Image (cartoon, helix red, strand yellow):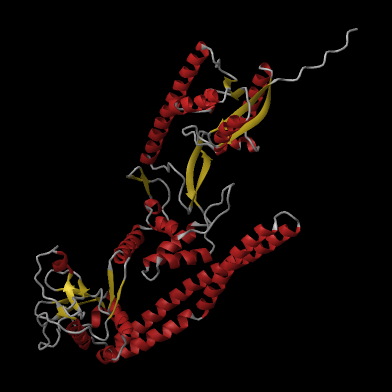
Amino acid sequence: MPAPVAPQPLTRSAVTYLRVSTREQAAGGGGDEGFSIPAQRAANTRKAAELDAAIVAEFVDAGESAKSANRPELQRLLAYIAEHRVDYCIVHKVDRLARNRVDDAVIHLSLRQAGVTLVSATENIDETPSGMLTHGIMSTIAEFYSLNLAAEVTKGLVQKARQGGTPAKAPIGYLNVRARDAQGREVRTVQIDPQRAPLIQWAFNEYARGQTAVIDLQKALTARGLTSVPSPQRGGRPLGKATLYKVLTNPYYIGIVRWNGAEYQGSHEPLVDTETWDRVQSLLKARGNDSSRHVKHDHYLKGVLYCGVCRSRMILDFPTHRHGTTYAYFICRGRASKRTPCARKAVRVHVAEALVEQVYASVRITDDTYRRLAEQIDRAYDERAASRATELADLAAHRAQLDAESDKLLRAHFADAIDLPTLKRHQDRIRTSLADIDRRLAEGRDAYTAERSHMRMALELLRDCHRAYKDSTPDLRRIANAAFFERIYLTEEGEPTPVPTATFTDFIDTGRGSNKNTRVEPRGIEPLTSCLQSRRSTN
């Protein structure tokens, strides 16, 4: 009986390249690689056996599109063959390497320069003329398939938007879900996120009050526990200021889907009413315009004075004398910007202050009005206190969640499930969040008690409003002007015409003007008034 012949060692070497386009394909079926990657590996292994070649390296791009050659594992493959002697590069199909002819030519050239033969496990690709022809045809087909697929996908997404669907990932506050319709077909739709939607609604309502900046709103939402929806690759993270700004300006929250520059009526449930949305957009636009000005000035009459001729806002102007002295005036914005033909003269700041002071002599408050306002103040602060109680409860609940998370991390570290640097990084994050929550809890305990007391004191002063205004500081005068008047028009003759807010319409005598002897004087040169503060910025 002849002795068995020992198997001869393989003398050729090969590398294999595997790719799927999406993360869903890479994780399909609950496995680490899905179904496609193992199937490609098995086919490439069989092809290597047919070539009597040993596979010396494998490169896998999981969830990488072939639209670009800038894929991490493909670049590693090209670097590997440049440094090592390799006979074959095996792919399942040519379109695994590239889906356009330019990238295909560049990759193929790199392989040939390294002395590597490209082999397809399922296609008749080699270095023969017929193989090269097949390669060119398959490359063209791959490019056509990719371009046609992109066009069809784009067309389908536009049609979905037109029908009220959500073509992309839903914004925070909503969840992309898969459901079944009446015929049992799978439908991808959107539903409200019960955890994050209430916080998004609170954010819009809070900003619409006009007392909160975006950065402060962002800190408050973080303290309440708002994070992005976690993914398999990364956990949920607090929203940044830029992300929150995008949330506040996204019409999706009032039921509108914006896609490719067009807007469509969505079929999802809105989180915000149109009135609140419009209020938020107006505040964002106004504050954005304010922040873009080159020079910013502060005065307690800023924002309440309007031109009685063209109805434009009156703004501060600071002309400088040739000797370098700066002077202060209120000027008509319509005239200054030449948007109106207004010829309204400038008003010296101390004259404008005197005119507005005279308006307060026309404020009349009766005992009945006093009692009615006191009841309104108490009712408003009771409502705010109830809202604050809900906020404090949310903060306390989030604090408990962070404490539990900290304990869980410690147990995981003691069980050697996470290393010390990871533990420290998470503990630092939790510690920062807890400190912010504790500060907000401390501020919230007695916040409205003091405010309510101050408002009642201010109401008492309304019995002699003129004297109270004269004796007030600039900051208190600003608050009073905002509370009493929507705007105050200054006529060309130098008389103020106030427009009261809805709350104070009943007891402000708008028929009475200022002292007739107080007139707007011609523009002249005078120093900056002592109560006027100004600051120059470069933003």
Quarter of the image containing the C terminus? bottom left
Q: Is residue 253 visible?
A: yes
Q: Nearer the viewer, residue 399 or 294?
A: 294
Give coordinates of residue 511: x percent, y percent: 15, 81
Q: Nearer the viewer, residue 320 or 178?
A: 320
Give coordinates of residue 367: x percent, y percent: 30, 89
Q: Nearer the viewer, residue 274 or 493?
A: 493
Q: Residue placed at 47% from the left, 79% from the top?
A: 447
Q: Which quadrant holds residue 505? A: bottom left
Give coordinates of residue 296: x percent, y percent: 29, 71
Q: Which quadrant holds residue 471? A: bottom left
* Left or right of 139 on screen, residue 523: left
* Left or right of 202 on screen, residue 516: left
Quarter of the image containing the N terminus? top right
* Left or right of 119 on screen, residue 282: left
* Left or right of 10 on screen, residue 472: left
Give coordinates of residue 373: x percent, y percent: 34, 82
